[in-house]
Amino acid sequence: MSKKDLEQKWVNTISDKLVGKTIKEVRYISDKEARDMGWHARSVAIQLSDGEWVFPMQDDEGNGPGALSTTYKDLPTIPVFS
C-alpha cells in the first residue's frame, strides 16, 4: 500500500469516528487516570456524543500526554498540566 493510500485509509477510518459528532464534555484527565497510563502530566479529554473519549498523546505509543494546537487567537494551545 502506498503512503498516500495508507493516509487515505486512516482519514476514512478517523472520519467515520469523528465527523458529525458533537462535544458532550471537556475535562482534564484525573491524576489517577494519568498514573494508570504511566504519565506524569495530564492532558485535556474530550467526550463525544457517542460516549467515546479522545485526548492528545505525545506519540502513537502513548509515552505521555500532549498539548492541542488550535487556530484560536486567544487560545493557541490547550496545555498539559503536571
Image (tube, grey):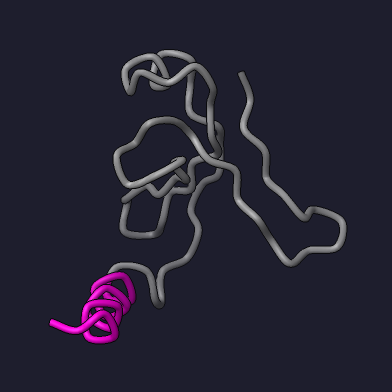
Closer-to-camera residue (20/72):
72
Give the quadrant of residue 4: bottom left
Numbered label tally: 0
Relative to 37, 68 lies left or right: right
Q: Assign the C terminus to one quadrant of the image.
A: top right
Relative to 3, 30 lies left or right: right
Relative to 47, 1 lies left or right: left
Whole-percent x, y for residue 59 in the image: 39, 44
Give the residue at x 68% y 45%: 78
Give the residue at x 39% y 59%: 49
61 over 77 or under it: above or below: above
Whole-percent x, y for residue 53 in the image: 37, 47
Q: Residue furthest right?
A: 74
16 over 76 or under it: above or below: below
Query: Does residue 56 belong to the magenta stretch?
Result: no
67 over 19 or under it: above or below: above
Q: Main secondary structure of the magenta part?
A: helix
Query: Does residue 8 belong to the magenta stretch?
Result: yes
Give the residues drawn in magenta, as a range. Answer: 1-16
Q: Residue furthest left?
A: 1
Whole-percent x, y for residue 1 in the image: 12, 82
Whole-percent x, y for residue 20 in the image: 41, 77
